[in-house]
Every structure is written in C-alpha cells, then in structure tokens.
Amino acid sequence: MRVDFVERYEWFLLFIFIFLTYLIPLETRLLWQPDEIRYAEISREMLASGNWSVPYMLDIRYFEKPVLGYWLNSIAQWLFGGGNFSVRIVVVTSTLLTGLFVYRAAMLVWHNRTLAFNALVVFLSSFLVLAIGTYNILDPIVTMFVTATMYYFLSGLHATNRKSRIKAYILVGIFCGLGFLTKGFIAVVLPALVFFVTAISLSRFKEVLCYTPIALISMVIIAGPWVISVALQAPDYWHYFFWVEHVQRFVEKGSARSQPMWFYLPIVILGILPWLGFLFGAIKSAIFLKKGTLYFSFWLFLFFAFFSASSGKLLTYMLPCFVPLSILIAHYMEELKNKQNEKIHNINAIINTVFGLVGVSIIVYSLLSTRFMLYETNEQYKALLGIVGFLFWSVIGIASFFKPTRLLTLFCSIGLSLAIGYAIPHKVESKSTPEKAINHYYSELADKPYILTDEVGIGTSLAWRLKRTDIRLTETKGELAYGLAYPDVQNKYYDLKQLVNLIEENNYQGLAIVLVRPERKEILSVISQLKVKPIVEKQGDLTFVFFN
C-alpha cells in the first residue's frame, strides 16, 4: 500500500465512517428509556397538542428543560414520521455540525488543513461523542450551540475590522440564546466564564466588554419571546427551572446525581478512545498554554472544573469538553509529526489492540462463568456479535501500527456501532429498551381504558408506543413529582389503596399494570389477594398484569 493512499482518500473514509456509525444504526436500534423516549414523547405531545410554550409529559407539566430541543424533535417527527430515525436525526445532525465548527476553529487558529481534519476525526470518532451523538438527548444539541458560540467569540478575537467583530458578537449572542432555549443558563454562564478569563489573559478585557452588549441584545431577541410566553402560561416555571434545576442541582449533596469530584476522570479516559494514547501528552502540552492552544485550554479546563465541582453529575455533561480536547489532541499530533515521533502512535495502537481483546475476554468469560452472566443460554448469537465488535476494534488497532494505515484508527468503533443494537442482553433490553416487550402485548394494552406503571420511564415508553398520553403512575412519582402536585392531574397517580379501589370500581376489568421495580412486590401481593385474580406474565425484568 502506498504511503499516501489513505491520506488521499481521507475525506471519503470519514464519510464512510459517518455513514456506518452515525446514520445506518439510527432506525435499527431500539429507543432507550428514560432519556430517549422521554424527549421523543414530550416532542410528540407538543406536536399533537399544539402547545409550543409549556412542555408536557404524559399530560403532566414538565419543567426540567426549555423548549428548543423539543421543537427541533417535533419538527423532525412532523417531517419524517414517528420512527427511530426521526427521533435521533436531530442529535446526529447536531453532532456533525459540531464537528464542522471543530474543523473551522482549528483552521481559524492554525490555517492547517491536516490539523483541522485530525481534530474533526478525533471528535467524531471518540467513543463518548459517538455514543451520545447518536442518542436522543439534549446534550448534543446544546453542545452544538455552545461550540458555535465559542467559535464566533474566537472569530471576534481574530477579526481585523469593526464590522467583522460586530458580526461575530451578534452570532455569539444568537447561539447563546439558542443554547439557553435548549438547556438553560448553563449555555450562557460557561462560555461567558471562558470569555472573561481569555480576555484578561490576552489583555483585551476592555475590548470584549465594549462588544458584550451586542451579544446580550441579540441573545435577548432570540430567547425573550419564549421566556415571556412560558411565564404567562406557567407562572411558576422559572422558579422551578432556576432554583431546582440549576441552583439546587449544583450545590445539593446526596441526590441521585451526586458523584465524587473525580467522577469525570475515567469518563474522559474511556471516552476519548480510540485516541487515548494521545490524551496525556495533549493535556501536558496544553498546560503550558502555548500560543494558539490558550483559548482551547481555558475552554477545556474551565468546563471540566465547573462540571466536576457540581454536585449533580451525569456522563453526558462531559460532551462539550470533547470539543476543545479533540482540537488539543490534533495539535499534539501535529507536534509529534514535526518531531517525527512515532512512539505515541504505537502506544495508541497497543491500547486499542488491548482494549478490543479485553472486551472479547469479558464476553467469553461471561459465557463460561456461573457468577458473571451477561447473556442467557439462548443468546449465544448476541454474545458472538459482541465478540465480533470488540475483535474488529483489535484488528483496526493492529492495522494502525503501520504509518500508511494510521488513519484507520477512526474505524475502531464501527464493529460495536453496528452490532450493539442486536447484542444487548435480554435482561437489559426488556427494561432499558422495552419496545419489544410492549409490542408483544400491544393488542392487550391498546384497548385498556386504564394503564398504570410503577416507573416513569416505562410510562413514557407505553405512551410513545401506544400513542396515548393517559398513562397513569402508581407507587412512584419520580421526575414528575412537581408536575403531579397540580390539582388538575390528581387522577394521574394512584397509591396502593387508590389502585385497589380503582380495580374494584371497574369490576376487575379494563386495567393493565406494567411493573418493573423488584421492591414493588407488595403491589403483586395485594393484587393476588383480590377476589378476581388477574393474568400475570413476565417479560425479562417487566411484569405485565392484566385485568380482563
């Protein structure tokens, strides 16, 4: 193979990678609960009701996020129907557009096409970016808007005349406003923090301060109409959204999302695969705050420090950090190229080879062990698919030892991307991707006047699949607790006593209950003591109870 063959077709190879990993699996993978189906269902209800100001889930007010993400998903469902493709196409498009801004930011600073292309490749093929960027959640959308905001501020710093600078700050405000409409104040506060530190370090604080009102005015023009609209229709929205979703989540200890300070370190280490070999060298290089990398270093370290300091932590919060990290890794690759240093590339190839073999070993061990069982006895084909996915990672790792095929590192994850939708163990699939189980009992569920469940995620799954919003909750309120406090939705929740009364009032017919929590055995115990025994069937971790 000629040395320049892969480089000559690098854009074509990247297109193949995007097609196989970001587009092909969209329709075939089942939707995961609670996140994917939650945002799909809220968008479906918004589209069906025509209420574009106040988000609802299961006809219950849902104040955890603003509306732009739901708007975009609703438009996708309107254009492409209610399939999995329409649910995920917005996040995939957002991730690809983020990659475009990664490329443009690197080009703006270094005017080096190879460096910019490598930054784009590292970003799109990083394990965490690929996993979240094809998963229906708001983080890829807000990451796109934050990245655009950061890019146009950088553009303003590089502008050579007042007109270009004004244009850049207008765009900073527009994308800040769009980010705010997607996920709230975080899309404004974090970029502003980086802008402030960068302006001081470059001795350009006065200049940035003079142009800031332009950005603020354009942000208010973008976000203001909805801010007023939701305040008029739901007066307590901003109280809940600001204090509970922002302030309390940041400072509250002992919550379900509370994690230690070091929580994100292993996520970054695993998430940057298959480029882990370059991570520590890139960070070491960035710490010196070299010319060019200064802005991206502040971007990475301030975002990372903020999310690490927050009490509430989720894996997806790290996604915006992978934008500057990808650029810093690409810059480090260019440094190694100039020094003709092959050692780090070989270390990276070894890491990928070993990672794939470890994955294969874990699956094989689970098949032989009685203590650690991933798959049931009739799921060997799923295990085989998992083995093939990890084995392909190792094969690409071996191929990347050779300089002419080094770019093929970006293909490491393709095997897992294509196989994962078919390789999920049944015990995980039934609860986390319950579409198959619901489809199995579709006819029994569709005509029931009352459907109840003991988990919000299963409730949204039922609503999404059955295309009905009258799903009721029993024995748990979860994330809908605030919305359920409104007097007009009191019939959406039943405690155990109310559940028994409902069953008796309906003469032991026309009800279905879908249970998932093992600690809810008291529900089954009480139901079994009723005068008329229901039909009880198991599907993995789900229990279906039918009163016919």
Image: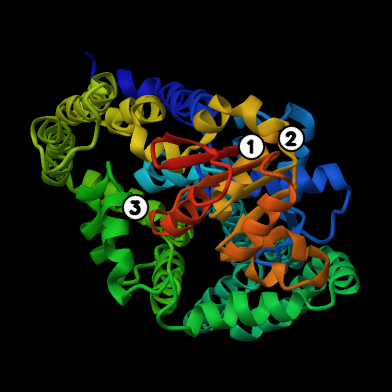
Let me know if residue 368 appears in the view. yes
Looking at the rendered structure, the secondary structure element under dot 1 is: helix
Residue 341 picture location, percent across and down: 14, 45
Residue 192: percent from left, percent from top: 60, 76
Say which residue label 3 marks.
331
Residue 353 image offset from top left, x and y in percent = 14, 34
Q: Quadrant of the C terminus?
A: top right
**Considering the numbered disc 3 on the image, is that residue within a helix, a strand or a loop?**
helix
What residue is shown with label 1? Answer: 87
Provide the secondary structure element on which disc 2 rests.
helix
Question: Are circles 2 and 1 on residues that touch, CB within 8 Å?
Answer: yes
- Quick one: label 3, few (<14), some, or many (20+) residues within 10 Å? many
Q: Residue 94: in sight, yes or no?
A: no
What kind of residue is marked 2? Answer: Gln
Question: Whole-percent x and y of residue 105?
Answer: 52, 53
- At x 50%, y 31%, the residue is 437
Residue position marked by numbered label 2 in the rendering: 77
Residue 471 appears left or right of 263? right
Identity, as a three-letter code, of the amino acid under mark 3: His
